[in-house]
Image (cartoon, coloured by chain):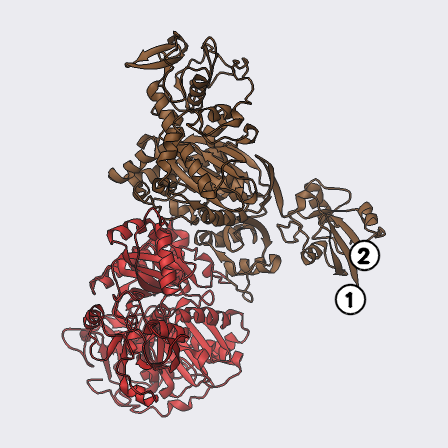
Chain colours: A red, B brown
Amino acid sequence: MVTKHLVIFQPGDKKGYIEDGKTLLEAAQELGADIESVCGGKLTCGRCAVEVDDELSIKYGIAPKSQPLSPVTEKEMECLSRRGFSGKYRLACSARIYGDVVVYVPDASRRTKQIVRKSIRETAIPVRPATRKYYVELSPPTLDDPLSDSQRLITELKHLFGLGNLDIDYATLTTVADVLRSSHWKVTVTIWMGREIVKVEPGYVDRSYGLAIDIGTTTVAGYLCDLESGEVLATEASTNPQVTCGEDVMSRITYATTKPNGLATLNATIVDGISKLMADITRRVDLTPEDISEVVIVGNTAMHHLFLNLNAEYLARQPYVPTISRSLNIKGRELGMALNKSANIHILPVEAGFVGADNVAVLIAEEPYNQDEMMLIIDIGTNGELLLGNREKLVCASCAMGPALEGANIAFGRRAARGAIEHVAIDRKSLEVRFKVIGNDGWGITPSVKANGICGSGIIDAVAEMVKAGIIEPSGRFSPELTSRRLVNSNDSPAFVIARADETTLGQDITISISDIRAVQLAKAAMYAGAKILMGRLGITSLDRVVLAGAFGSHVSKEHALTIGLFPDCDLARVYSVGNAAGDGARIALINVDKRQEAEEMARKVEYVELAAEPDFQRHFIDALDFPHHQDSFPHLVSIPGDSAFPSATG
Amino acid sequence: MVTKHLVIFQPGDKKGYIEDGKTLLEAAQELGADIESVCGGKLTCGRCAVEVDDELSIKYGIAPKSQPLSPVTEKEMECLSRRGFSGKYRLACSARIYGDVVVYVPDASRRTKQIVRKSIRETAIPVRPATRKYYVELSPPTLDDPLSDSQRLITELKHLFGLGNLDIDYATLTTVADVLRSSHWKVTVTIWMGREIVKVEPGYVDRSYGLAIDIGTTTVAGYLCDLESGEVLATEASTNPQVTCGEDVMSRITYATTKPNGLATLNATIVDGISKLMADITRRVDLTPEDISEVVIVGNTAMHHLFLNLNAEYLARQPYVPTISRSLNIKGRELGMALNKSANIHILPVEAGFVGADNVAVLIAEEPYNQDEMMLIIDIGTNGELLLGNREKLVCASCAMGPALEGANIAFGRRAARGAIEHVAIDRKSLEVRFKVIGNDGWGITPSVKANGICGSGIIDAVAEMVKAGIIEPSGRFSPELTSRRLVNSNDSPAFVIARADETTLGQDITISISDIRAVQLAKAAMYAGAKILMGRLGITSLDRVVLAGAFGSHVSKEHALTIGLFPDCDLARVYSVGNAAGDGARIALINVDKRQEAEEMARKVEYVELAAEPDFQRHFIDALDFPHHQDSFPHLVSIPGDSAFPSATG
């Protein structure tokens, strides 16, 4: 009869009887305990270090044995100490079981690690990347054992790690014969989705890297991640180089469809831009693009199409249909990207013509589908995107806001960059103005940075403060009773001076004119009306949470946004700015492949509402032109503290 | 209760009760009868034409009804007559069932067609290509139905043809939006292996083309096939352009491994050569390479590696290991091939270092694994490849024969081309010689084509005739008793004149010298010894069939090959020349994907015997140096008719 011993793995309480002489790693595999092993028991990686704990044994009613495991070997000791382990630690692949034992698996030795995302609530995201590394030592071929190189590799990977039906990427295949021989048949193999060999490297390599990219119309943001720990190693933002072909989505699409080779030019421009970003971001941590084994890309539908070299013309024409909506896996080399030839590019799905992969990324970052509370997520840009729902149902829409809130279409508007007025406060009595300029630490002007314009958040602030100070009426008209030296005439229409000529680099006053206010009204009414249509679709009249996503969302004052009626009333304590949630979602999809599946399902679950086809849209839109609204009540607006005070100088 | 009618499909006798009002096509699908339909019932393709036959009805005991089917519509009539059908024919997609009926499905309307391969025996090969075409008419998107273009296509393909989980190739994806709109949403979709969209063409297209290619060291042969009928539309053979980098396999490998960019050069050379062949072969039938939707490639292991840009160095070094042995599917664009961007290239598996995909192709063409009889297949070249076995077991080997039988290493040897002596006869008494030159219709010399050398089959003929005429002894020595004015001294060693100077373009005699005979002995002994080792491995002492594959095999005289002892004794009526069986195998794998699976399984089932590692090889080799053999008996040699007569002038 075979002698067996009770083996218990903690945490997780996986236990059972294991044959005498088996290793702890074999026991863990048998009992389903989660232990990492890259080298498959070659005493190379040291990833399977576990603690054998007398106290735990006692707790589980097992009398601690003096020798429940085989003695530590010299090679094991060397490997453990190289990884910084000592004392009670053993390598699970080396320690053989000769008595009952309780084993503690520390966090670092678990295959399934987690990262914590801090947003509205803390979320633990298990690290399950698309690629995994495996170390193998092969016996060289002989006349009696003439298996082909790739079959030799595949057979050993199946034998050691139970990986069946492996394919090998063609670009990697061309490297195999030389790498195996130059490394004396000791190699680290990177496997994609458990089914395809995408890299064979000489010797033992234990780190693996991936890149998440959010292609914004204006900015491309990259996050370089360690695919083993899930940690972000570096971030990099650069201007989307396509801006030279048009500032906004529509002008890019026009460029693509009307210029000779327009699409090819825009495609090459963004591909080169991303390749450059990859070179920059990897250089900062002493890596190269060759080290990147997986990339996740998100972007609005137009950026998505231009990156994929797809004709974007039909996105801009009724009925605004994308070429493809579901997610894609494409080799980077097919897209002309300069990174590891076999690396996969995962592109998240899009929802509809104007609701892109960036919104899907926001969706999996915020997970409204896992909540009971009714959440409205808004992403403000030239197109505003709205997503409303909870675990029961999700609806989305896109509304044409115009570029006012991005600082365009506004006389002194400009993008959020050094010198732009980003915050404004107006004294209720004196109507005096203070403002904060990007590049200055606090409020007010310093000689070093004068104002050169006003950006989106500054415009919202200015308009909201003008409403609160009574400078403009709810209808958007300048108050006829108003007298102030800041009230001027600009091109025969009234305007209010935010910064005086001497506070600017322009040599003239920076003002908000009646036509600027009109532009803000059009933008916010479109967003508000969209929200109302979606609420009507779900049969609700109030919101539990509002999430402001995107760069604009993280700079805008929640109070002022509500003051002008950018979205329906909500408790301000439950309005959140989540920053680049699209980038977060891309990063989450990079480190956890289950979230890709979730993205695919949820993108299809979200019901797209075409606002242009809604008969009530015009009515809602006209009602929403007023500040904050023609008839809706805003009970949460009264409670805003410091209503009429200037912010403190450090504001 | 639903009314049902008895419906019987012939041939195949598929019958059952079908609901009143269903179409014949629906009935066929329900009952598993095999009817083609490309357009899915749009009355476009006319592929589903069937005969409704009163006589058959009577035969099956069904009283012929006057109206068992709905009346012929105008559109149906138009479609039928366009396809050349009339009278009793109906479109199965249009005719609805209102009574019991017997239906005859003509060959042309069956989805599964067959081609007949005539070789040793006739084999019917069902036509089951990797790609199929489907015609769809989509409803254009609207604001209420804004499905993406590719999802719209995929949804309709699933709806009409039951094709689930379709992917779309990236290169095809980039074309979809424009093709759908330019064709007013009526397109023909090509689907690969039932899972990937690889082409979207405007309108209705009903033919589909594929190409089978055998990359020989010397010649590249291409077969352009109609993938619907399985027929060969054109064949084309061109010189492998790599010959400028070396005539044989070993010199190519040396070039690849020692010249700067040697591998890349050889790879580009063959890829360009194949691209040119594709252009030539398609032009001959008014097509372009863009029309090719699938390619199958075979070749020896070195050609296989060089085509795939794999380092071939290790193929030539002990233990002669290939980089990959199993089959591959790679997009043509990845290999730089100039054809439809989404077309797949299927590369058949290889068996071992020197037993290539061409041998696997021979294997699936000859199917020894489906026979009880013990079959030896030999393919003669610089390397001879041997395959022996039956349904029980298969073994293979490769032997280094030297290039003698290809006409190299022979003083006057040359490749089989215009001017080469391909057949030789020697009168037993006068020792006079007649020969046949490639380019001449019969035996003897005409002024237009004089001899410029002697090719492989001519060399075998010459040596065999010299043996039979007693000019050389079984040991290979010239007979010491011999006197003839054709016996000369060439470079101080004896030689026999085959063609006199005035019969040649060379201005000198074409002779067979003692060193030429030695080269033949070495080559044939290697082949013979290999066969004996394989026979020993299977424990057999005689062969039921011998198959001579390859160009050499189709030109060599079976009798003469046996006379010199190229292979062990076998009834000459059961020795077959099958021509380019590798090309045939490639073509079979092109038109029937099941044969690819078979190739994969059989390539793994064949046991490779490394002759260099066999202790008995040297003994067998030395015994086999004699003509025909030192000790083996050749009972079938005595029965050869016309032993000493010259062939007739039309030979």
Tell me the subunit letter for badge 2.
B
Residue A363 drawn above or below residue B124: below
Q: CB under 8 Å between callouts 1 and 2?
A: no
Residue identified by numbered label 1:
B2
Q: x, y (%) of residue A374?
A: 46, 83
Tell which of B355 and B469 is nearer to you: B469
Compare marks 1 and 2 and give the one earlier in the sequence.
Answer: 1
- The residue that appears at 73% across and 59% down in the rendered structure is B22
Residue B315 drawn above or below residue A439: above
Residue identified by numbered label 2:
B99
Q: Quadrant of the C terminus of chain A?
A: bottom left
Q: x, y (%) of residue A566?
A: 40, 79
Residue type at tag 1: Val
- The residue that appears at 53% across and 76% down in the rendered structure is A616
Q: Element under label 2?
A: loop
Taking the image as shown, residue B456 lies to the left or right of residue B36, namely left
Residue type at tag 2: Gly
User: How many numbered tags mark residues here?
Assistant: 2
Q: Quadrant of residue A251?
A: bottom left
Tell me the subunit letter for badge 1.
B
Q: Is residue A300 visible?
A: yes
Residue B436 drawn above or below residue A617: above
Q: Element under label 1?
A: loop
The 10 Å Cα crowd at callout 1, few under 14, some 14 to 19, many 20 or more, is few
Q: Is residue A625 visible?
A: no
Q: x, y (%) of residue B567?
A: 46, 31
